[in-house]
Image: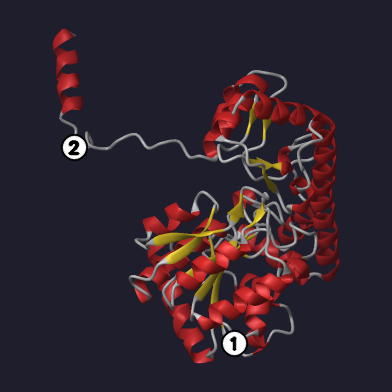
């Protein structure tokens, strides 16, 4: 036995994988890990961006259940999809993004492949940039979604940051954003959040989007939109697509990753799309072929179930109307929680301006809390949020807003 232990120890010491280091925990998913280990009855998970009911339970949209019942009745098979994805889904997702009246749609100037939700779509787009625009830098907002940098780094695409969040006003640093983009090399790729910026919840105004579109034209930038919250941010599919539709109307070529995790609650189905809007229909065909080539080597075929749900909901007038009503309900619950949280914070610390809580939109609130203040909320209040101070309001109920306000104010007063 002792000799066997020595043999095992020697084998372990000489493993060819000895140089593989333990990866650090994911900054977002690690929040859920810590939450699960906490046994406090007061614990709150405000880290992961997933919608919860007022009872803080996962929510399956009724319209999704109806679509699945229709699919079951149709006895659909489970054969592989084409590499490009489900044709009905691809057609529906482009119409949702650009609108039924879009010339780009009518003229066949959009290259689309169904992909693995937002992350997979971004990764396919990143691989396309690396292959056809080698050496181009992608400019990301500071801050941005935690996975953006990793996605482009994994594809071998360099990134830089442009100013976005103004800590003094808890708002958009638009002047800084424009200045940094003007200083970027011509032809750069600029990643833009189509609506409900993650993590800040701060979007440019319609007038500012106009200026950004003109700047992208002037600098010959390739805009790359990440649209993860269409319909979920404001409750309106059209309002939340205003930025991409504006750039399309102005004749800009651009890339766009879409996700149906949030607006249809299809988190585990991994359904999304990578779109490239071009000014030439023939080139759209060529670009589609190369996107398919990238997808084929990466994961071969996208999953079918979620794509059928999306295509069924968008393709049925009655289900589509129900979906829009359900999105209004979900976004309305989050808006209500925002209002209540602001009121509770103002009661406890009236000297501070808390208006950012309701001026920000979508799933998140960017509080400006420091890493140390967040740690205090983890340790003393059992409230789990990411260390950049982002709160997922989708995981907050109305009756927990006072408790959260107590924790935020306590952290501000006790931790500098």
Estimate the x, y position of residue 374 in percent, counting from the top left: 60, 31
The image quadrant of residue 32 is top right
What label does residue 16 carry, if any?
2
**Figure check: 390 above or below 248:** above
| Callout 2 crowding tier (Cα within 10 Å): few <14, some 14–19, many ≥20 | few
- Label 2 sits on a secondary structure element that is loop
In front of the other: 251 or 61: 251
> How is the structure coloured here?
secondary structure
- Label 1 sits on a secondary structure element that is loop
Asked whether residue 97 appears in the rendered view, the answer is no
Q: Earlier in the sequence, mark 1 or mark 2?
A: 2
Give the residue at mark 1. Answer: 108
The residue positioned farthest toward the top in the image shown: 2
| Residue plotted at (55% across, 29% down) | 372
Estimate the x, y position of residue 384 in percent, counting from the top left: 62, 31
| Residue plotted at (58% across, 38% down) | 386
In front of the other: 100 or 256: 256
**Figure check: 335 above or below 99:** above
Q: Split into 4 quadrants, where in the image is the N terminus?
A: top left
């Amino acid at each position: 036995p002792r000799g066997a232990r020595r043999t095992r120890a020697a084998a372990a010491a000489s493993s060819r994988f000895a140089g593989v280091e333990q990866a650090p925990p994911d900054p977002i998913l690690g929040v859920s890990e810590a939450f699960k280990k906490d046994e406090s009855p007061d614990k709150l998970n405000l880290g992961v961006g997933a919608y919860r009911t007022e009872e803080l339970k996962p929510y399956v949209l009724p319209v999704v259940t109806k679509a699945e019942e229709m699919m079951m009745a149709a006895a659909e098979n489970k054969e592989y999809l084409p590499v490009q994805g489900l044709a009905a889904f691809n057609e529906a997702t482009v119409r949702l993004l650009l609108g039924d009246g879009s010339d780009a749609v009518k003229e066949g100037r959009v290259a689309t492949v169904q992909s693995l939700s937002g992350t997979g779509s971004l990764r396919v787009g990143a691989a396309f940039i690396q292959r056809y625009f080698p050496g181009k830098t992608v400019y990301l907002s500071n801050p941005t979604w935690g996975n953006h940098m990793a996605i482009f780094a994994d594809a071998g695409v360099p990134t830089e940051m442009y100013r976005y969040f103004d800590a003094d006003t808890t708002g958009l640093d638009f002047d800084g954003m424009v200045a940094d983009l003007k200083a970027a090399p011509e032809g750069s790729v600029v990643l833009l959040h189509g609506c409900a910026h993650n993590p800040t919840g701060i979007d440019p105004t319609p007038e500012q989007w106009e200026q950004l579109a003109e700047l992208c034209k002037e600098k010959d930038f390739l805009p790359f939109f990440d649209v993860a919250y269409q319909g979920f941010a404001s409750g309106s599919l059209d309002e939340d697509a205003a930025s991409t539709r504006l750039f399309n109307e102005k004749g800009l070529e651009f890339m766009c990753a879409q996700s149906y995790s949030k607006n249809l609650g299809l988190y585990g189905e991994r359904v999304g799309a990578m779109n490239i809007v071009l000014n030439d229909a023939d080139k759209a065909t060529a670009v589609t072929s190369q996107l398919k080539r990238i997808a084929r080597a990466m994961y071969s075929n996208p999953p079918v179930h979620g794509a059928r749900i999306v295509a069924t909901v968008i393709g049925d007038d009655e289900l589509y109307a129900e979906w829009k009503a359900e999105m209004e309900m979900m976004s309305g619950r989050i808006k209500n929680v925002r209002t209540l949280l602001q009121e509770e914070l103002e009661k406890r610390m009236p000297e501070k301006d808390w208006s950012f809580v309701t001026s920000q939109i979508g799933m998140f609130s960017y509080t400006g809390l420091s890493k140390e203040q967040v740690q205090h909320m983890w340790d003393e209040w059992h409230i789990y949020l990411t260390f950049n101070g982002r709160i997922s309001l989708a995981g907050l109920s109305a009756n927990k807003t006072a408790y959260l306000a107590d924790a935020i104010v306590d952290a501000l007063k006790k931790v500098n």
